[in-house]
């Protein structure tokens, strides 16, 4: 099992550009999440999904959109990147029968100039 | 709103020492609590998950305890090694598990010196 994988690992964007981050999991997990991690702010939930075709807002959803067309994939989109979106982005997944224990991907480091 | 606090923010110990990391949370209505490890530039690795009905969980040299009524959890690391150097985060999951959303503390950065 590869677990949770994220693509790309690094990216530099100019202000106003768009991009999509891809998260994939091979554990057949129902739940998937996108977090951002910033110094002094900890991990904050952006959006999450409780199943294929469903998405919901987390703590800091503004400026991001998500889609979950397939159970194994969760996409995070930035339509018009801003310097405030410079961060490390983590995807995670979990399964009800394991107490919703969350498993994390390796992260994507995004810089917006 | 649930708040999770980890003290100290940083800890430096000599190799071989037993140590305790602390986590406190403001709302005792939790489903479970999860401890993670994060190495620099890496993702989070789940160490232990302790259900609200449990008092403790053990994995190797790690032992996590939970006192839900007082809003506290501790992570005990026995016989620390330089390879234990990392940031340790705790996160709580509310009783209302829809979405299974976690609230994280900011972590304790541990350095174990050879």
Image: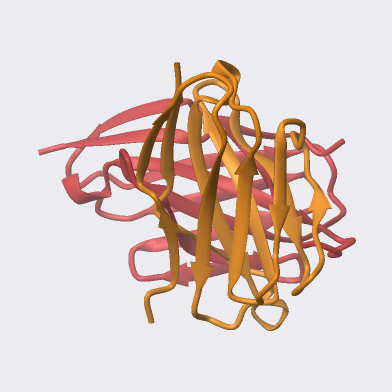
Tell me, by letter, which chain the rendering colours orange: A
Q: Is residue A18 left or right of residue B87?
A: right
- Pick the front one: B58 or A19: A19
Rendered location of residue B91, percent (x, y): 63, 49
State which quarter of the image contains the C terminus of chain A.
top left
Residue A29, picture quadrant: bottom right
Q: Is residue A92 above or below residue A29?
A: above
Q: Is residue A53 left or right of residue A14?
A: right
Residue drawn at 54 percent across, 28 percent down: A17
Question: Would you say residue B113 is visible in this rendering?
Answer: yes
- Pick the front one: A70 or B91: A70
Residue drawn at 65 percent across, 63 percent down: A32
Residue A94, picture quadrant: bottom right
Rendered location of residue A36, percent (x, y): 57, 38
Residue drawn at 77 percent across, 37 percent down: A59
Q: Is residue A112 above or below residue B15?
A: above
Q: Colour of chain B?
A: red
Q: Is residue A6 above or below residue B23?
A: below
Extreme residue in the front direction: A17
State which quarter of the image contains the N terminus of chain A.
bottom left
- Asked which colour scheme the image uses, the reply is by chain
Residue drawn at 31 percent across, 38 percent down: B40
Rendered location of residue A81, percent (x, y): 59, 26
Extreme residue in the left direction: B114
Rendered location of residue B59, percent (x, y): 41, 71
């Amino acid at each position: 099992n590869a677990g949770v994988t994220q693509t790309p690992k690094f990216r530099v964007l100019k202000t106003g550009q768009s991009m999509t981050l891809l998260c994939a999991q091979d554990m057949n997990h129902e739940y998937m999440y996108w977090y951002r991690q910033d110094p002094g702010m900890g991990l904050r939930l952006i959006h999450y999904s409780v199943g294929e075709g469903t998405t919901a807002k987390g703590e800091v959803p503004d400026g991001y959109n998500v889609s979950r067309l397939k159970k194994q994939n969760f996409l995070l989109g930035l339509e018009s990147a801003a310097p405030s979106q410079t961060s490390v982005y983590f995807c995670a997944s979990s399964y009800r029968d394991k107490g919703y224990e969350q498993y994390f991907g390796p992260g994507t480091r995004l810089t917006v100039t | 709103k649930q708040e999770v606090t980890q003290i100290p923010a940083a800890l430096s110990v000599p190799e071989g020492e037993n140590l305790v990391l602390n986590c406190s949370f403001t709302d005792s209505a939790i489903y479970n609590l999860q401890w993670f490890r994060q190495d620099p530039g890496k993702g989070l690795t789940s160490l232990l998950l302790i259900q609200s009905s449990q008092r403790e969980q053990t994995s190797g040299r790690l032992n996590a305890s939970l006192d839900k009524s007082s809003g506290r959890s501790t992570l005990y690391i026995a016989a620390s090694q330089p390879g234990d150097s990392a940031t340790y985060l705790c996160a709580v999951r509310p009783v209302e598990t829809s979405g299974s959303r976690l609230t994280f503390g900011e972590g304790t950065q541990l350095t174990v010196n050879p």
